[in-house]
C-alpha cells in the first residue's frame, strides 16, 4: 500500500507539472494569435507571459483540492485514473483554444454574458450571425491543441524517470498546497488589481479559470437570467443619488428620477429658423460600432470615414461623446428616452417600463416618424421599443418585403441582415412611395460594421485600404500593422462611409433638405480592435449637421447619448411651436458646448455581460476597483487613493440602486 501511495503522489505531481507546462507554453501561441488577428504591441508579450502566475496558482489549487480523490482512485485503478487525467488535460487544452478564439472575436475573455442572453438571442448571435470560420482560425486552434498534446506525450515518455523523484514531488506538493491555502486566487481574479488596466488583466489572466469564476459568481449571486428579486431602494441611497445632481429639481416623492424639465436651449444660437416656421425635419443615423478612434490608437493618422469627417467639420462636433453601453442594446433607450438601464438593459425588461421619449413628443407635435433597420427588429427588442413609442412607420425590410429570399440568403452567409447601402436604397424607395410630410423624423440603425465584416465587393474596399496605407509612408508602424491585419474591418468602414454619402446626396436632392437637421453617432465603439483604455470602448463621435447652421464648432466637453433627447426637446420648444411636458425622467441634460475638454456629467456604462462597473464622474473614471484621471485624448493617469476609490464606488452604487429600482418597479414617471 505504501508503494501505491508513493506512486499515486508521484503521478499526481508529475501530471500537474505537465499541465502547468502546457499552460505556460500555450501563452506565446495565444499572444501570436491575438497579435495576428486583432493587433497588439510587441511589448504586450510580457503582459501575456506574466500571467503564468495565474497558471501556477490554478495548478496549486488543483493539486491541493484534487489530491485525495486522485490518490484514492489511483491506488485501485492506476492506469484508468492516469488516462482520465490525461484526457482532462487535453480537454483543458481544447477549452483554452476555444476561449482564445472567443477572445480574438470579442477582445475580452468569456464571462457570464452567455447567461444574460435568452436562448433565442444566443442562437441569433452565435449561429445565425457574426460567425464565419476561416482556415487561419482552424489552424490556430489545431496548433493550440497540438502543443499540449506533444507536451503530454513527452511527459509520458519521462514517466518512469519521474517516479524515482518521490522526495522532490513531496516538496513540490507541500509548496503547492501552501500556496493554495495562503494565496487568495479567486480574489486576485475578481479584483484585477495586479494590472494597471482591464485590458492588461484580460490578456494575462488564465482564461478558463476566469470564465469559471465569473459564471459561477453570476449563478451564485444573480441566479442566472431569472426574474429579479424585489429590489428595494433605501432612503439613504435615494438622497445620495439626488444630492449628486444639484442641477435637477426633484419634486415627486416615489419617483426617484422624475424632475422638472429645465434643460436650457443650447442649440438655438447655432441655427437659423426654418423657411416655413415649422420645426425642422430630423434624421438620425446611428452607425454600428462607430468609435471616435477607428484604429484604436491615440492619434490616428488615417481616416476610413472621410465623408462623415467632412460633415463633422461643417457641423457641430463632439469628439468626447459617450454611449451608455458597450453593445447596441442600450442605444435606442439612451438616445430617444434618456432612460436608465436597470439590471439587463432598459428594453430587456418585459413588460418595458412606462416611459416618455423624444419620439412620443415628436408624434404629439405632428411629426411622422420612420425607423429603418436591416436586421431582425426582435433582436434586443428594437421593434418593441419603437412600437411602444408610437413610431408609425416601422420600415424594416423583413417586415414589409414579401420576397424574403435575399434576406434568408444573407443570413445563411452569416450576415445580420441587409447591407447598409441596400438598407438606404430600400429607405429611399420606401420614402418615394410614401412621401414625407413636414415635419418628419427618420431613424437609421446600421449593421454592416458588425462582425463578421462582410459586404458585397469587400475586396474592392480592402484594396482601397491598402492603397491608403501605402500612400502614407510616414504612418505609425503600430497603426500600419493594425490596419493591414484587419483589412476587412477598415474596408467595411470605407464602404459604410460611402453608403452614408449616397444617402446624404439623396436627402440633398429633396426640397425639404434645407429644413433638415442630421444627428450622426455610433451605438458604441467597434470591439474588434483593442482601444487601449476601457473608457474608449464607449467613446463615439456625435455630429449635428444641417443647412440651417449659422456656424460650425468642435466642442471637446464630455456629452453622452443621454443628452440628445433633452437637448433637441429644449431646442424645439424654445424656437418653434413645439410643446413639451414641464417634467421629465431624463438622466441627461443639454449638451455642454464648451470648446475645452471637461466633464460635468456623471455616466455609468453597462458592459456586454450587463455588469455596471465603469463610472465617469467629473475628473475621475472608475474602472471597477481602479481609479483614473482621463485627459483630453482619453489618455489616463492612475490614481492610487483608496478613499477616492471608495467614494466613487459608493456614488456608482447609489446610481445603480436607483436605476434598478425605477426600472423594476416601473416608477420612471407618474
Image: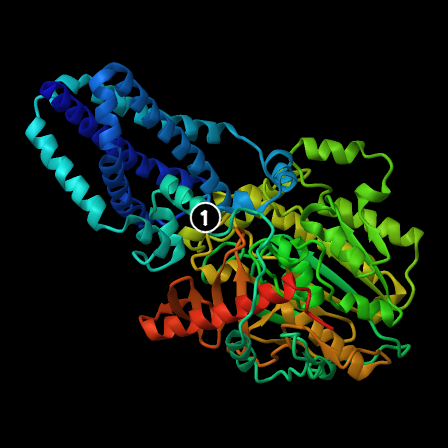
Residue 526 placement, left or right of 626: right
Residue 610 shows in the view: yes
Which percent across, then down, holds residue 124? 65, 39
Residue drawn at x 76%, y 36% is 407
Which percent across, then down, holds residue 369? 83, 61
Decide which of 48, 612 is in the foreground and name it: 612
Residue drawn at x 34%, y 75% is 643
Which percent across, then down, holds residue 166? 8, 27
Residue drawn at x 48%, y 55% is 296
Residue 273 versus residue 183 in the image, above or below: below
SS class, disc 1: helix
Residue labelled with disc 1: 220
Residue 557 placement, left or right of 619: right
Decide which of 50, 593 is in the foreground and name it: 50
Q: In the picture, which quadrant includes the C terminus?
A: bottom right
Residue drawn at x 31%, y 38% is 28
The total of numbered circles placed on residues is 1
Which percent across, then down, holds residue 343? 58, 58
Where residue 630 sits, quadrant-wise, is: bottom left
Decide which of 282, 307 is in the foreground and name it: 282
Residue 6 versus residue 445 in the image, above or below: above
Residue 136 versus residue 225 in the image, above or below: above
Amino acid at each position: 500500500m505504501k508503494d501505491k501511495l508513493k506512486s499515486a503522489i508521484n503521478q499526481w505531481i508529475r501530471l500537474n507539472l505537465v499541465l502547468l507546462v502546457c499552460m505556460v507554453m500555450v501563452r506565446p501561441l495565444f499572444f501570436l494569435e491575438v497579435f495576428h488577428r486583432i493587433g497588439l504591441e510587441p511589448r504586450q508579450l510580457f503582459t501575456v507571459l506574466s500571467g503564468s502566475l495565474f497558471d501556477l496558482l490554478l495548478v496549486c489549487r488543483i493539486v491541493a483540492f484534487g489530491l485525495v480523490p486522485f490518490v484514492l482512485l489511483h491506488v485501485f485503478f492506476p492506469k484508468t485514473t492516469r488516462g482520465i487525467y490525461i484526457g482532462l488535460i487535453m480537454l483543458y487544452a481544447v477549452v483554452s483554444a476555444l476561449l482564445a478564439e472567443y477572445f480574438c472575436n470579442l477582445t475580452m475573455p468569456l464571462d457570464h454574458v452567455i447567461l444574460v442572453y435568452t436562448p433565442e438571442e444566443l442562437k441569433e448571435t452565435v449561429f445565425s450571425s457574426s460567425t464565419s470560420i476561416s482556415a487561419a482560425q482552424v489552424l490556430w486552434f489545431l496548433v493550440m491543441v497540438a502543443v499540449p498534446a506533444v507536451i503530454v506525450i513527452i511527459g509520458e515518455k519521462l514517466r518512469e524517470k519521474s517516479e524515482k523523484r518521490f522526495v522532490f514531488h513531496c516538496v513540490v506538493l507541500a509548496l503547492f498546497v501552501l500556496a493554495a491555502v495562503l494565496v487568495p486566487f479567486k480574489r486576485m481574479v475578481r479584483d484585477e488589481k495586479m494590472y494597471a488596466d482591464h485590458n492588461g488583466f484580460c490578456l494575462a489572466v488564465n482564461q478558463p479559470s476566469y470564465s469559471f469564476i465569473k459564471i459561477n459568481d453570476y449563478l451564485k449571486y444573480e441566479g442566472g437570467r431569472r426574474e429579479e428579486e424585489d429590489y428595494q431602494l433605501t432612503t439613504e441611497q435615494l438622497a445620495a443619488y439626488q444630492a449628486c445632481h444639484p442641477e435637477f429639481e426633484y419634486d415627486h416623492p416615489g419617483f426617484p428620477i422624475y424632475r422638472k424639465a429645465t434643460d436650457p436651449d443650447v442649440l438655438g444660437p447655432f441655427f437659423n429658423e426654418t423657411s416655413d416656421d415649422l420645426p425642422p425635419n430630423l434624421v438620425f443615423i446611428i452607425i454600428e460600432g462607430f468609435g471616435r478612434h477607428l484604429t484604436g490608437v491615440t492619434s490616428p493618422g488615417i481616416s476610413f470615414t472621410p465623408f462623415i469627417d467632412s460633415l463633422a467639420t461643417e457641423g457641430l462636433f463632439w469628439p468626447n461623446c459617450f454611449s451608455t453601453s458597450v453593445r447596441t442594446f442600450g442605444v435606442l433607450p439612451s438616445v430617444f428616452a434618456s432612460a436608465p438601464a436597470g439590471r439587463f438593459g432598459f428594453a430587456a425588461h418585459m413588460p418595458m417600463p412606462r416611459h416618455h421619449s423624444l419620439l412620443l413628443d415628436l408624434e404629439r407635435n405632428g411629426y411622422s416618424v420612420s425607423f429603418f433597420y436591416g436586421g431582425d427588429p426582435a433582436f434586443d427588442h428594437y421593434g418593441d421599443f419603437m412600437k411602444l413609442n408610437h413610431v408609425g412607420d416601422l420600415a424594416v425590410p423583413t417586415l414589409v418585403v414579401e420576397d424574403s429570399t435575399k434576406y434568408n440568403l444573407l443570413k445563411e452567409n452569416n450576415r445580420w441582415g441587409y447591407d447598409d447601402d441596400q438598407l438606404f436604397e430600400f429607405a429611399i424607395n420606401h420614402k418615394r412611395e410614401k412621401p414625407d410630410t413636414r415635419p418628419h423624423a427618420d431613424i437609421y440603425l446600421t449593421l454592416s460594421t458588425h462582425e463578421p465584416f462582410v459586404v458585397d465587393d469587400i475586396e474592392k474596399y480592402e484594396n482601397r485600404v491598402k492603397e491608403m496605407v501605402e500612400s502614407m509612408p510616414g504612418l505609425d508602424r503600430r497603426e500600419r500593422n493594425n490596419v493591414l491585419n484587419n483589412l476587412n474591418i477598415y474596408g467595411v468602414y470605407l464602404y459604410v462611409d460611402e453608403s452614408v454619402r449616397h444617402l446624404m446626396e439623396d436627402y440633398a436632392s429633396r426640397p425639404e433638405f434645407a429644413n433638415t437637421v442630421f444627428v450622426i453617432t455610433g451605438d458604441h465603439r467597434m470591439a474588434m480592435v483593442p482601444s487601449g483604455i476601457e473608457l474608449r470602448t464607449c467613446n463615439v463621435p456625435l455630429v449635428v449637421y444641417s443647412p440651417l447652421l449659422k456656424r460650425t464648432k468642435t466642442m471637446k466637453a464630455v456629452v453622452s447619448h443621454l443628452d440628445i433627447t433633452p437637448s433637441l426637446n429644449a431646442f424645439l420648444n424654445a424656437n418653434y411651436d413645439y410643446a413639451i411636458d414641464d417634467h421629465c425622467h431624463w438622466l441627461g441634460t443639454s449638451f455642454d458646448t464648451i470648446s475645452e475638454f471637461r466633464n460635468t456629467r456623471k455616466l455609468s456604462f453597462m458592459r456586454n455581460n450587463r455588469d455596471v462597473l465603469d463610472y465617469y464622474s467629473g475628473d475621475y473614471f472608475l474602472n471597477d476597483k481602479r481609479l483614473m484621471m482621463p485627459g483630453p485624448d482619453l489618455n489616463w493617469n492612475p490614481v492610487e487613493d483608496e478613499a477616492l476609490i471608495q467614494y466613487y464606488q459608493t456614488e456608482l452604487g447609489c446610481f445603480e440602486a436607483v436605476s434598478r429600482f425605477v426600472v423594476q418597479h416601473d416608477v420612471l414617471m407618474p
